[in-house]
Image: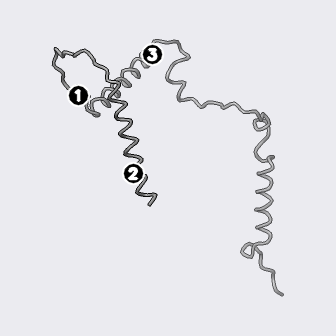
Amino acid sequence: MPVKILPILLASALSAAGLRAEDQVVEIAPIVVTDTFELRREPPVVDAFTKHLERQIETKRAEQEAIGQSPIWHARFWNFLPRLESSSDFRQFHTPHYLTPAYREAARAIEDFRLNSIFDARPTARN
């Protein structure tokens, strides 16, 4: 029974709201359209992408021309030289590789493998 009452209450609420909306009618002056309107078409995606690539190419050319006219420290041959990355550990530049702990551990592991290997064992002479 309560299910049947709900639509009735909802319909009466909507009709009351409709009566109130009719009471508040506002008139607007008529608008006259004197021009023709056309749907503006967007350029295809391929054209937009092509323009984007052209702008990138032009920017790169302008950059290359500016670099060509700039002083020696902007010359292209500097790109082919290795760069030293900044490091906070300066000991790596002064410690020889054979003195590093990693090298010593690897050498110790190789020596242990040689001592315990069955393939490297020298046969003993029998008399």
Check the picture and name the quadrant holding the N terminus.
Answer: bottom left
Q: Mark 2 highlights which residue?
A: 7
Residue that appears at 25% across and 32% down:
44
Q: Where on the picture, by quarter, is residue 38?
A: top left
Proximity of marks 1 and 2: CB atoms separated by less than 8 Å? no
Image height of 113 relative to 14, above or below: below
Q: Which residue is mark 3?
A: 68
**Camera-nearest label, 1 or 2:** 2
At a point 62% along the width and 30% down the height, the residue shown is: 83
Check disc 3: other Cα within 10 Å, few if <14, some if 14-19, many if 20+.
Answer: few
Q: Earlier in the sequence, mark 2 or mark 3?
A: 2
Q: Is residue 59 left or right of residue 39?
A: right
Query: Residue at image x 79%, y 47%?
Result: 100
> Could you tell me which secondary element the residue under label 3 belongs to?
helix
Q: For marks 1 and 3, give the CA distance.
A: 42 Å
Q: Viewer-proximal residue, 56 or 38?
A: 38
Q: Report crowding for label 1: few under 14, some 14 to 19, many 20 or more residues within 10 A (C-alpha).
A: few
Give the image location of residue 122, x and y in percent: 77, 75
Query: Which quarter of the figure is the C terminus placed in?
Result: bottom right
Q: Which residue is mark 1?
A: 41
Residue contact between numbered discs 1 and 3, judged by CB atoms under 8 Å:
no
Q: Mark 1 vs mark 3: which is more N-terminal?
A: 1
Q: Amino acid at mark 3?
A: Gly
Q: Secondary structure at mark 1?
A: loop
In the image, what residue type sits under mark 1?
A: Arg
In the image, residue 126 sits, relative to residue 108, either above or below, namely: below
From the top left corner, tell me how far across and down residue 20 is, in percent. Answer: 37, 31
Q: Nearer the viewer, residue 89 or 81?
A: 89
The x, y position of residue 121, in whole percent, is 77, 75
